[in-house]
Image (cartoon, coloured by chain):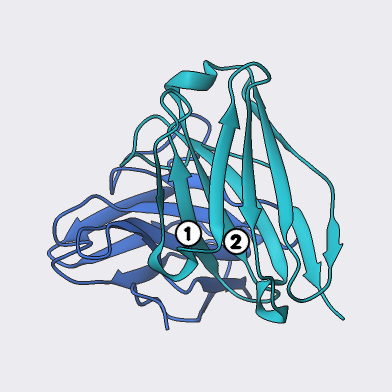
Amino acid sequence: QSVLTQPPSASETPGHRVIISCSGSSSNIGGNTVNWYQQFPGTAPKLLIYRSNQRPSGVPDRFSGSKSGTSASLAISGLQSEDEAHYYCATWDDNLNGWVFGGGTKLTVL
Amino acid sequence: QVQLMQSGAEVKKPGASVRVSCKASGHSFTSNHMHWVRQAPGQGLEWMGIINPSGGSTSYAQRFRGRLTMTRDTSTDTVYMYLSSLRSEDTGAYYCASSIGWYSNFEYWGQGTLVTVSS
């Protein structure tokens, strides 16, 4: 049972937009910024979004993040087949005094 | 270019201990904190703990306290993760990941080390 709640799966057709949610509480998302990671099978995760809405150099602007209250979301527009991957949200939890991850969302591009 | 190079796969028996190393290059070793994150087969990511290579201070996730130790060697820019009293549930991929600060994102990741615990 993950501290942060994500839908286990999401799907959308190429060219369209998908939003992946991440729900937490006041001790984690409510008081801290959220990071998002992308992971392809058999490989290490890669930083996709940091500080809730910032993109590292090299990440396409099709990827965007937002946060409101105790929830965060990752939006991917202009979906491409290569976006098919697992996506994880993560943040610091003040009560647990450690980092927590969402359970991950498997994105399928139909 | 920042690179985190981890040691190779390990196979251990229940009750044994494992050591995984992570050698950093391309950035200041003592200016970047190092985390360990593990992933059971087919499961999500789980944060294990963090070490500040500068002073060696550490913080471990509650569920690993008593079994987990993180150390660093500043002469070789390498951090180590020791996990003891291994059980089958510890099987999985172990990743090191670096961050600028204690509360910063995990910017760079190692390639992962598969640890298999089996009798």
**For chain B, what colour was chosen?**
cyan
Question: Would residue B111 be visible to someone looking at this image?
Answer: no
Identify the element where label 2 is drawn.
strand
Instruction: Give a yes or no on whether discs 1 and 2 share a subunit.
Output: yes
Please state the horizontal and vertical placement of residue A61, each as a whole percent of the image.
43, 41
Please state the horizontal and vertical placement of residue B105, each as a whole percent of the image.
39, 42
The numbered dot on residue B38 is 2
B50 vs B5, nearest the viewer: B50
Distance between mark 1 and mark 2 Cα atoms: 7 Å
The numbered dot on residue B115 is none
Identify the element where label 1 is drawn.
strand
Q: Which residue is mark 1?
A: B47
- Please report, as a chain letter, where disc 1 is located: B
Please state the horizontal and vertical placement of residue B104, each as a whole percent of the image.
34, 39
**For chain A, what colour was chosen?**
blue
**Residue at point 49% right, 63% down?**
B66
- Please report, as a chain letter, where disc 2 is located: B
| Mark 1 or mark 2, earlier in chain | 2
